[in-house]
Amino acid sequence: MKTLKDVKIGESAVVVKLHGEGAVKRRIMDMGITKGTELFVRKVAPLGDPMELTVRGYELSIRKADAEMIEVKE
């Protein structure tokens, strides 16, 4: 299983499944990250947390812990 955390800077991935429960999963979905959405990794902070993505035409920063809950495919 490949997660968003494993995607390198400058690469794109498509969301396969969201893991997690209740409020956490709902918050990720509210940010526009749903099944089938394409994500582009723009930057990662020096210590790896957070990472900046382009999702649905806007920039979004997401924590590494949340990125681990997002299963992706290339």
Image (spheres, grey):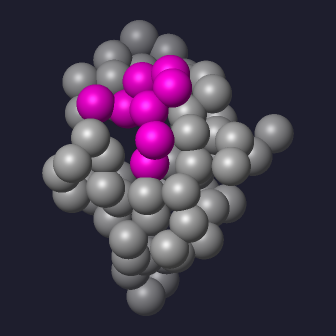
Q: Is residue 1 visible?
A: yes
| Residue at far left of view | 58
Compared with 32, 4 (above or below) is below
Compared with 59, 39 (above or below) is above
Task: Tell me the quadrant of the picture where the N terminus can be found.
Answer: top right
Is most of the magenta stretch helix, strand or loop? loop
Q: Position of residue 49 (x, y in %)?
A: 42, 69
Among the 4 quarters of the image, the one containing residue 26: top left
User: Over which residues does the magenta segment extend?
Assistant: 32-39
Task: State how many labels appear.
Answer: 0
Among the 4 quarters of the image, the one containing residue 43: bottom left
Q: Residue at x 50, y 74 (%)?
A: 10
Q: Residue at x 43, y 58 (%)?
A: 40
| Residue at far bottom of view | 46
Q: Position of residue 16 (x, y in %)?
A: 63, 27
Report the side of 61 relative to 16 (left or right). left
Q: Nearer the viewer, residue 21 or 44?
A: 44
- Assess whether residue 38 is covered by the magenta stretch: yes
Compared with 36, 41 (above or below) is below
Q: Position of residue 7 (x, y in %)?
A: 62, 61
Q: Residue at x 51, y 48 (%)?
A: 67
Q: Position of residue 39 (x, y in %)?
A: 44, 48
Compared with 67, 41 (above or below) is below
Q: Residue at x 52, y 75 (%)?
A: 9
Q: Is residue 66 visible?
A: no
Report the side of 69 relative to 3 (left or right). left
Q: Nearer the viewer, residue 15 or 47?
A: 15
